[in-house]
Amino acid sequence: MQVQALTRSARMSPTKVREVTRQIQGLPATQALDLLRYIPRKSARLVAKTLASAIANAENNHNLSSKTLVVASATVDQGMVIKRFMPAARGSAHPIHKGTSHIKIVLAESTNLQK
């Protein structure tokens, strides 16, 4: 059984979030949540929030224990780009592109976890 959680349009560029999601793939869900608490980045807080939501989905909707869950996949896709302009010299303007990302975490049930 697989359970997922999705955060859409998180206000951070996908490359910054991917650096954090690579570290939690394949880990048990509770261990991944503990690891994310000690990473001092905004992207770690966004991923931790999505992971906590996936764990809550598994417990409430499918009656699964959080101790048997493993992070099957953690993917980050590019969301919409907010386009702004910044004034520059001689009356010109330079474009500013503010990226967003979609964070998707899939948890799978595993019965043979090693402690």
Image (spheres, rainbow, N blue to C red):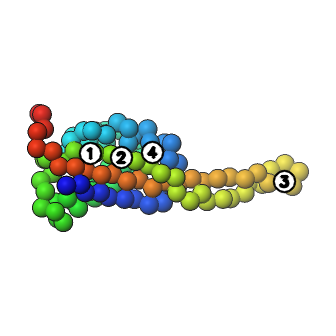
3 and 15: which is toward the camera: 3
In this view, 34 is above or below 103: above
Please give the residue where the numbered disc 2 appears in the rendered image. Answer: 74
Asked if the residue under mark 1 is in contact with the one under mark 2, i.e. CB atoms within 8 Å, the reply is yes
N-term-proximal mark, 3 vs 1: 1
Q: Amino acid at mark 3?
A: Ser
Secondary structure type for disc 2 = strand
Please tell me which residue is depicted at 51% across the width and 42% down the height of the picture. 15
Please give the residue where the numbered disc 3 appears in the rendered image. Answer: 92
- Cα–Cα gap, marks 1 and 4: 16 Å
Q: Is residue 63 left or right of residue 16?
A: left
> Which numbered tag is attached to residue 17?
4
Please tell me which residue is depicted at 72% across the width and 53% down the height of the picture. 95
Please state the horizontal and vertical placement of residue 2, each as a whole percent of the image: 23, 54
> Which numbered tag is attached to residue 90?
none
> Which numbered tag is attached to residue 71?
1
Please tell me which residue is depicted at 20% across the width and 59% down the height of the picture. 58
Q: Given the current orientation, which residue lies at the most extreme bottom position?
A: 61
Which of label 2 and label 4 is nearer to you?
2
Which of label 1 and label 4 is nearer to you?
1
